[in-house]
Image: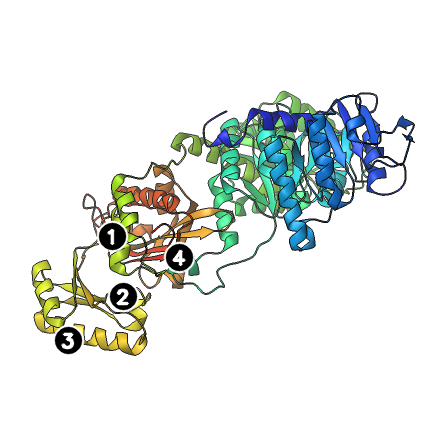
Amino acid sequence: MESLGLETWTEDQMRSIDRMLNPRSIAIVGASDKAGYGGRLMKAVLKSKDRVKIYPVNPNHKKIAGLKAYKSVSELPEAPDLVGIVVPYDKVLDVLKECHEKKAGSAIIISAGFAERGTDSGLRLERQIGAFARESGLRVTGPNCLGLANVRSDIWVTASSRTLGGLTGHIALVCQSGATAFGPFLLRAVDAGIGLSHIISTGNEADLDFSDFARYLIDDEGTRVIAGFVEGFRDVRKFVAVAELAAQRGKPIVLIKIGRSESGARAARSHTAALTGSDAFYETVFKQYGVIRVQDYDELLEIAHLLATSRKPEKPGIAVVSHSGGISSLTADMLGAAGLKLPSLSERARDGINGILKDFGSAANPADVTGFARGDDFPQIMDYLINEPDVGTLVIASAGAGNQIDHVVDLGKRTKKNVAFFWTGSRGDDTTLPKLKSSGIPIFYSPQRLAHGLKSLVDYHAWREHRLAGGSGRTPALTPQQEATLERLRGLGHESLSEKESKLLIADWGIPVTRELPARSAGVAVDAAQLLGYPVALKVDSADILHKTEAGVVRLRLRSAEEVRTAYDVIMANAAANAPNATIEGVLVQEMVPGGVEVIVGIKYDDQLGPMLLFGSGGIMVEVYNDVTLRHCPITRSEALDMIAEVKGSKLLRGFRGKAPADVDALADTLVRVSQMAVHLEGHLAELDINPLMVLPAGHGVKAVDALVVLKSQGPPHLL
């Protein structure tokens, strides 16, 4: 297997999925020739009886649909490649054990009544099924699914009543919802003339999940795009690994991700937690690993079709031609709003098109060619546009009048650049539209979706080049010093670490921290200040007061012994007033860090996605402006530099109004180290804020002025 953590997938697992998707023999346990799931599954499977051996299993019948029925799987004359199971939920595990004894290759569990019921017994039984599948090697999709279809081979193992064949293509569809896969997706694909290679419903995913099937499909030569409909991922590492491999192979993943819940509304102990939510995390992970997120069925199919039928654009520029000035202008506006460029035409193209149009239309980009869009001169007009050196894609916006479609289809065959069609006519057109659909040229029905699709195409290939050049993030093993620090902090017995404890922790991951000394009296604080050198800062030393500024327990830029004494007394009084039950260890006397740019670096963990890194403008205003960006951990140095560039406050880092540039290189290295720390402490760390992290002038590094570590709530810290 490849690297990138892909040892998760074994050859046996891939072989089992292959037998599921390319079966030579299928047994249906619970088969019937009556209405219902067993009857529909049997009817669908019979479509391939000339190529696949079909074995109905039902002890109450001697024959089903003219085929011999068997009382049990054990009585079958051979070990089937695939077993479809439609029996009461409490009988499923027994059937699986019998299938394993028979050495069946794989199973689809149509039966429902498991975790989706919301009962402990249903969840427990589902987990038992998953455990049995993994331990036995009899891999399973479902339960509570509608099955799957190898559309390319016209093999339909589904309990859906829809088994439409004849329209094959290069898009594999993997859905957690079977009704969605064999309902709106299938119907819309047929209506739009978009071919599919596979349809797979995964249901409750007791065993195989979206990532497992996606991993298999990456190796499938006939699949160019993996499309999906998911609510969540059971294992983010599998998803990230498969997304990275898909990027290596150049196979885009297009997803509808439902469940846009926000966790940011919960009470948050750190700035990082307050600034993030679960959907923001998903958006980040998709962007980071090149996954294209869409919002509805049609958009998924249209963009997947565009990616499956289009080459990498030679240039990002778009040319638009239409019979209507209004249509071409609106299309150009939508493309421009999406961030796409419509380059001006060269003199050669303008003169050539004007020579055809005479005094009609507009020889520009977008081009309004009026009635010439339906004539024999249209191919020459399209050639002028698509052959422009800065154009990678030509868009025809039209209703396909005259013999225009023939010309467009011919262009699609002879050009090495991309061609897309914005259809402005009736979707019920039964004359020219079917010819356009059958050509494989991607069709869009709104300028907004056209723009989003073309932007996705351009961005995907640009992202892939950048990603491959930057490599993948890796996390080194813990050093002896880091292990010793974890052991030393074990058993602290509180979830939030004090600033002193927090800095001890991050320092061992290579994050520079301020020089500071603890003090339990005003006199000791003065002595500490003299040792450090004025000016200094005083902060309360307590694990129980997380937001020190709000509690009035921070004093900055103290320049004398008198100021230090006064500050100490004020801090202790404010601490007692604002947090009377807090444990106070005195104060920390810290060096002031002048001449730097304040930024925030944080870690937050998502239940499904794992460790996330936050970077943004620092100080107390971070929550006001929300000038932050996110990445899934670990990150590469290239990704660290991208994060820095994405934040508006990065202008200050580059040097602003005569100030010297900041040490961006040191900041990038720090972001990488914090991301590695996040991976090391997963399961034990809940949140981390380094706010502010001072980025000093170029060549002078960075320094953490304040830090807050919150451990995962689990009684006494398990790791620390």
Q: Nearer the viewer, mark 4 or mark 2?
A: 2
Q: Nearer the viewer, residue 121 or 261?
A: 121
CA–CA distance between discs 4 and 2?
Answer: 20 Å
Q: Circle 4: is it few (<14), some (14-19), or many (20+) Cα within 10 Å?
A: many
Query: Vertical placement of 444 versus 623: above or below?
Result: above
Residue at which label 4 appears: 272
CA–CA distance between discs 3 and 1?
Answer: 28 Å
How far from the left and from the top, in percent, is residue 350?
A: 55, 32
- Kindly identify the amino acid type of the residue bearing the numbered disc 3: Thr
Q: Nearer the viewer, mark 1 or mark 4?
A: 1
Residue at which label 3 appears: 566
Residue at which label 2 appears: 542
Residue at which label 1 appears: 504
CA–CA distance between discs 2 and 3?
Answer: 19 Å
Q: Is residue 301 visible?
A: yes
Q: Earlier in the sequence, mark 3 or mark 1?
A: 1
Q: Circle 1: is it few (<14), some (14-19), or many (20+) Cα within 10 Å?
A: some
SS for callout 3:
helix
Q: Earlier in the sequence, mark 3 or mark 4?
A: 4
CA–CA distance between discs 1 and 4?
Answer: 20 Å
Q: Say if mark 3 contacts mark 4, CB within 8 Å.
A: no
Q: Earlier in the sequence, mark 2 or mark 3?
A: 2
Q: Is residue 164 visible?
A: no
